[in-house]
Image (cartoon, grey):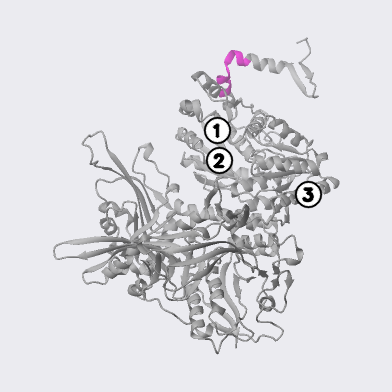
Amino acid sequence: LIKGVDGIIHLDDNNNLIWISHIILDEKLNDIKSKGLEKISQQISKSWRGQLVYKTEIAPAEKIEDFGLRPPQIGALFAIGSHWSLSKNPATIVMPTGTGKTETILALQVANQVAKTLVIVPSKALRNQIVNKFKSFGLLKELGILTNEATYPVVGIIKKRPKTKKDLDIFKDCNVLVSIISSVSGGTANDYRKDIADIMDLLVVDEAHHVAAKTWADLKLAFSDKPILQFTATPFRNDGKLVEGSVIYSYPLRTAQEDGYFKPISFIPIHEIDQERADLEIAKTAVKKLRGDIKEGKSHQLIARCKSKERATDLIKIYEKIASDLNPQLVHSELTDTDERIENVRSGHSKIVVCVNMIGEGVDIPALKIAAVHDKHQSLAVLLQFVGRITRKGKKNLGDATVIANIADKNISGWLEQLYSEDSDWNKILREMSSDAAKEHAEFIDFLDNSESFDKTEIDDAKISQNSLRPTFSTQFFSCEEFHPKRFHEGLPNRYEIVNMWINEKTKTLYFVTRSKENIKWTNAKEVEQKDWHLFVLHFDQENKLLYLASTNKTSSHDNIAKAVGAKKQINGEDMFRSLGGIGRLVFNNLGVTKHGRKNLSFAMYTGADVKQALSETEKKGSRKSNVSGYGWENGKQITIGCSHKGRVWSKSAGTIPQFIKWASGVGRKLIDNSIDTKSVISNVLIPEYVKTLPTCEVLSIDWPIELICKSEERVIVTISGEDYELFNLDIKLINIKPLSSNLSFEIVVGEDEKSLCKYKMNIKGEAGFDISNLTSTDPILKVGKMEIPLLEYFRDYPPLVRFIDLSELDGNILLSAEDSGLVKIPKEHLISWVWPTTIDIKKESLWKKGIRREDSIQWHTAKHYIESGFDIVFDDDDAGEAADLVCIKSEKDCINLTLIHCKFSGGAYKGKRVKDVVEVASQAVRSAKWPGKIKNLVNHLEHREKRHKSDPSRSRFIKGDSNILSTILRETNFKEIRPEIVIVQPGISKTKITDNQSVVLGAASAYLKQTLGIDLSVICSK
C-alpha cells in the first residue's frame, strides 16, 4: 500500500464495495500465517471472559439504552447454566420463532467461553444465515450486550463430508462450525463422527424438531460425553413425536405475544370443496390483501405454502397469471438458484414467493406478512414455524399479519381444525393451541419426568429410551392392598438381567426392561446364543385395590413378581369372563376348551363355525372355557378383546404406558363388578355356524361387506362400462330372497330412481363354502385407492352382509346368531305419534322427485319440525348411498346432537298394516349405525353429496345451514361429545294399531342400535 493509504476498495458490477486490501486485513493474514488458525481460535475464546453484559431489555425498548437481552434470552441462558451445573445430559430449549433464539446461541458461546461449537441446521439457507450471524455476533454488540473488545470468532462452513483425517483440520481451526446434518453424518462422515466429537466442546442442534432422522441420532450418540443443546420453536418433531432430551426452558407462545415479539394475526377463511377452485380463490384473496397493504404504504410480501414440488409448479402459474407485476418466485430444494431466488424476495424485488412447506426454517424475512395456505400443515411443529415467521416483529412500515386458508379441507387433525376454524380469533386460538400443545406435551412427559430411572447396565447397545416403550394391551390382574415396587427383584428369575428400570411414585407404576440368554435347541455350540428382551409394566390401581402386571413374556404367569411387590391373590377363573361384559354384538374368533379326565387334562381350540361346538362342550360336566378372543362394540366403537381362565385379558391395541393404564383400569373395574353375570354374557355372543339354507325369519337388511365399509367413501369407486361411480352414490339392495332356499340375489343401484347397474346371485353350500355369480353382462371393477379388482372377485372374498330380524347375520355361508336370540317387539314408549296435517300426502316420501320440490311430502314436514326445534343443520341426503334421508345436527353447550332420520311413505292411502312398510326403513336405520362414530367421515360424505348439486343452486341439499356452519360444528366435535339419535318416520304405522310383525321388525332394529351404539330407536308414526 502507498504510505498514508489504509486500503484499496473496489466497486463491482452490482455496486457492492469490496476491500481488495486493508492494513488491518494484512495484519490478520500475517498473524494467521505465523501462528495458525488453531492457536488464534484458542486465544479468541479466552478473550471472551467477562465480555458479555447480562443487561435486560426494558420494554418497549424504543431507545438504544433500553435494549438488552430479552426475557426469553435471559431465561434460556440461566437455565442452561443451571442445567450444566448439575448434568451433561442433552437439553432442549423451546423459544418461539422471533424471540431471539440465534442471539441466545451467540451469547451462550461467549458467556461460557466455549472454544469450539458445532451448530447443526436443517437447510443450506439457514446455514448461511447462521454463519453471517456468528461472523458479526449478530445484534449483541449493537445492543450493548457484548463489549467492543470481544474478538470475533473464527467461523467455518462445512459444505461436504470429510474423507480423510486432513479434512478434520477445519474443526481444529475454528471457534464455530455450521453444517447441515448430511455433511457431518452419513457416508464417509460416519468414519469421523467420533473424531469430530472429540475435537468439539459443544453440539448445538438448531430447529431441533428435525432430530427424528437416524443421522441426527447417530451424531448425538457420538457426542454422548459432550454437552448437547437443542433449540426449537416447538417440543414436537415433524413426525409429531417429542424431541428427546429434557426441556430445561420453555418460553410460552402466549407470553411471547404478550411481550410484543409477534404482530397480531388476522384470518381470512374461504370455503371451497374443489381443489382447483380453492387454489384460485386463496390466491385471489391473498393478492387482493397484498395490493391493499402495499397501497397503505406497508412493505408487505406474500408467501404461498404447499406440500409438494408438483403443487408448487401448478400454483406459481396461478400467481403469475393474476399478479405477474409482483414478480412471483418459485422456491424449492431442487432448484439450482434457490439462494438467488430467496435474495430476490429478501430485497423486495419479488413480492410473492411460492414454496414447498417453508422457504427454509430460520430464514428471516419479516416482510412476509401474508400467508396463503394452499395445503394445511400436518404437524404443530411445522405450523408454529410457519406462523412464527410471518408474525415477526419488524420495521415500522410492517403491519399485522394475515393468513388465508380453505376451511373446507377436513383431512387434518382436530387441533388444526380449531386453529383454522371460521369464527375464531386467530390470535387467540394460536395462543390456545400452543398452550394446549404444551399442556399435552407436559402431561405426556409428566409420567416420564416423574419416573425415576435406575439404569442397570453399562452396555451402550442396551440403553433403551423410555419414550420408545409401547406395550401391547395385555395384562394379569391381582388383588392388592399395598405397593412396594422396589421389591420386585425378589420375584424375578435369576436368568433375567435388568437392563433399564423406572419407578413412577406419583402414578404407582413400575416398569423395566430385561434381557436373558435362552438355550437354543438346534445346536450345542456355545458361540451361538439367543437373547430375549422383555418389557414389564406393573401398575397399582389404588382406587380398585388391583395390581396390573403386563409383560411381553407370555410363557410365565409372573406370580412371584406380583407377590414380591405386594399382590395377594391373582384374579382368575370364571370371573375373567366379566371382561366381556358391556360388549355388544360380540363374536368369538377363537374359543379354547379344557376337559378334565381322571388322570389327564386335554385342551381343544375351536375357530370359526366350530365355536358353536366349543360352547356346547363347555356346558358338559368336567369341561370349561379356557380362553376366548373376538370383537364387538363398546362405547359406540368396535373393539377387540381376549381373556383366559388363567387370568389374562388382552386386546390387539398398543400404546404408551399411560394409555395402557387407562385401558387396564377399565377392564379391572369389570372384573370386580359382581353385577356382571358371565353366563348371561356368553349367552348373548353371536355364534358362527355353517348353513346350507337361509333362515326362516324376515330379512332386515343387506349391507356392503364390513371390509369395504371401513374404507373412506371417497377412496372407493366402482367402474361400470367405463363410467366411475363413487361408493357414496351407490346402494346395495336385495332383489330376491326366500326362507329355507340356498340362494339370494342382490343388485347395485344409483340415483333417486335407484337405477340398477349390475346384479349378482349368491349360493350357500354349508361347509363347502359359497359362490357368487354375475347376472348381468357388465363386469364392474372395484377401485380402492390404488388397488383394482373385479367386483365379482371381491364379493367372492368378502360377500355382502345380510341381517335378519332375529339379529342373526349371514356372512357368506356362515350364520352368526346368539343362543338366546329371539323376536323382540319395540317398546310402546319408543313410538311417538304425530297428528299429520291433511296438507301432507303420506304416500309422498321425498322432498324432491324428478326435479320437482314437493312441500306436501313426509320429508318436508319432518324437516320443518327439526328446523323449528332449533337444529343448525338439516340436510337432505335422500338417494342411493344415503347416510339417512335427513341428517340433522344441533350444537349444544356441552354436546353435539346428531339425528339421522329415515322416512318411509305409506303403502296405501290409509295407514297400512303391511310389514313391507317398515322393513325397508328399519334396514336403513340399522345401516346408519356406522355414522355416529365417524363424524368426520359423515361430514365428508355430506360435503361430497352437496358438491354434486353445485351445478344446480336450487337443488342444494342444505334445507337449513350451509357448509360453513357444518365446518364450524365439525371443529366443535373435537371438544364436545356426540349424542346420536336414529329416528324412523313412518306415518303408515299406527301406534295403537301396530301389528306384531311390524313391532318385531322395529324391535330388531332397536335392539341392534342398543347393542352397537347404546341408543334406542325412536319411531314417529300416526296415532
Per the image, the residue denoted by label 2 is 210
- Asked which secondary structure carries label 2, the reply is helix
Q: Is residue 363 visible?
A: yes
Reply above or below: 257 against 618: above
Q: CA distance from mark 3 to mark 1?
A: 39 Å
- Please name the amino acid that badge 1 sits on: Ile
Closest to the observer, 637 or 767: 767
Q: What quarter of the picture does the N terminus occupy?
A: top right
Looking at the image, is mark 2 or mark 3 earlier in the sequence?
Answer: 2
Q: Position of residue 243 (x, y in %)?
A: 52, 45
Nearest to the observer: residue 242 or residue 709: 709
Mark 3 or mark 1: whose residue is earlier in sequence: 1
Looking at the image, which residue is at 82% across and 47% down? 293
Tell me where the magenta segment starts and ends, as one range.
31-42
Considering every residue shown, the one lying at the far left of the view is 599
Q: Nearer the viewer, residue 426 or 311?
A: 311
Q: Quadrant of residue 843?
A: bottom right
Q: Are marks 2 and 1 in contact (CB under 8 Å)?
A: yes
Where is residue 232? Give x, y as percent. 58, 43
CB under 8 Å between discs 3 and 1: no
Q: Which residue is mark 1?
A: 181
Residue to which mark 3 is pinned? 284
Query: Residue at 64% of width from left, 13% of height from top?
Result: 30
Q: Quadrant of the C terminus?
A: bottom right
Task: Inspect the image, locate mark 2, and give the three-letter code of the amino acid beneath it.
Answer: His
Q: CA distance from mark 2 to mark 1?
A: 10 Å
Mark 3 lies on a secondary structure that is helix
Number of numbered tags placed on the structure image: 3
Check disc 3 and give the amino acid type. Lys
Q: Do we see residue 826 in this rendering?
A: no
* Residue 115 magenta-highlighted: no
Please tell me the numbered disc located at residue 865.
Answer: none
